[in-house]
């Protein structure tokens, strides 16, 4: 069974509001994939908007549904840039690709837990609240040896799937750290992603996430 949402129009449309929300969701799902632990799986063309019209069994179709339209590479250059930045970040950031299971505990003194979960108010998440559309995740870094480009850094992710904007409070656990913006899926290119994770810092410990959006911050070097 497939679950999907067309956001008001089935199939192609010229309605900019619908197209903009669909593009935001694409960035949301790509971000969720590449900021997750484990091995990410990307289908060729996902990085440039090759949707196969929502068909996940197109391998058995020799027709335009499954063919690769190379015009998409130029038409969706902003999406390709976004995806390249995600891949590069994942490659150089060990915090989002642990080699072992996360346990929610620090790996040493004066370190953050390897993973912590919070609600939008900055309090510990209540997993029994099934009506909640907002979630904050903090991946704690650990001391690493090797190239400076691969030094682990704390990563903080805010996700909001609700239909209206929501204010988030940075968890107390993450206070006192200089956070810099990496991703804001609600922003237009080029401000949707800062490839060097050097975007603006949060103001006064608060963030406003638009509907159906994700923001990711990384601890400054």
Image (spheres, rainbow, N blue to C red):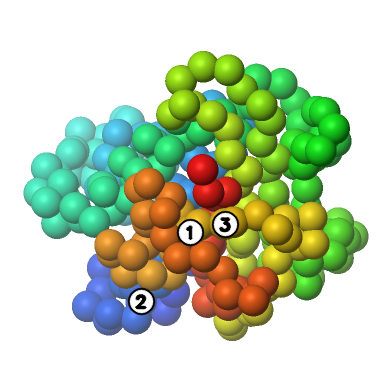
Viewer-nearest residue: 218 or 40: 218
Kindly state the secondary structure of the residue where label 2 is placed.
helix
Q: Residues within 10 Å of mark 2 (few under 14, many from 20)?
A: some
**Residue beneath disc 3:** 179
Kindly state the secondary structure of the residue where label 3 is placed.
strand
Q: Quadrant of residue 216?
A: bottom right
**Residue beneath disc 2:** 18
**Residue beneath disc 1:** 181
Please report whichever mark, 3 or 2, sits nearer to the chain's N-terminal start: 2
Kindly state the secondary structure of the residue where label 1 is placed.
strand
Judge from the rendering whether residue 67 lies leftward or rightward of residue 194; answer left or right. Answer: left
Tell me if residue 150 can be seen.
yes
Marks 3 and 2, Cα distance to the nearest angstrom? 32 Å
The nearer-to-camera label among 3 and 2 is 3
The label on residue 153 is none
Residue 7: x %, y % from top left = 44, 74
Q: Residue at left 31%, top 41%?
A: 84
């Amino acid at each position: 069974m497939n679950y999907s949402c067309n956001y008001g129009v089935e199939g192609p449309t010229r309605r900019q509001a619908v197209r903009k929300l669909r593009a935001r969701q694409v960035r949301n799902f790509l971000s969720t994939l590449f900021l997750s632990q484990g091995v990410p799986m990307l289908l060729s063309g996902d990085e440039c908007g090759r949707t196969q019209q929502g068909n996940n069994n197109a391998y058995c179709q020799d027709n335009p549904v499954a063919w690769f339209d190379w015009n998409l590479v130029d038409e969706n250059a902003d999406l390709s840039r976004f995806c390249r930045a995600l891949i590069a970040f994942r490659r150089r950031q060990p915090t989002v690709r642990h080699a072992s299971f996360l346990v929610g505990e620090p790996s040493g003194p004066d370190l953050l837990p390897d993973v912590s979960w919070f609600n939008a108010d900055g309090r510990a998440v209540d997993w029994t609240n099934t009506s909640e559309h907002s979630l904050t995740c903090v991946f704690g870094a650990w001391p690493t040896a090797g190239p400076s480009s691969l030094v682990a850094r704390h990563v903080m992710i805010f996700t909001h799937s609700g239909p209206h904007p929501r204010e988030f409070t940075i968890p107390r656990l993450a206070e006192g750290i200089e956070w810099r913006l990496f991703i804001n899926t609600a922003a237009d290119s080029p401000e949707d992603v800062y490839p060097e994770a050097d975007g603006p810092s949060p103001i006064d410990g608060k963030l406003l996430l638009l509907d159906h959006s994700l923001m990711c911050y990384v601890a400054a070097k």
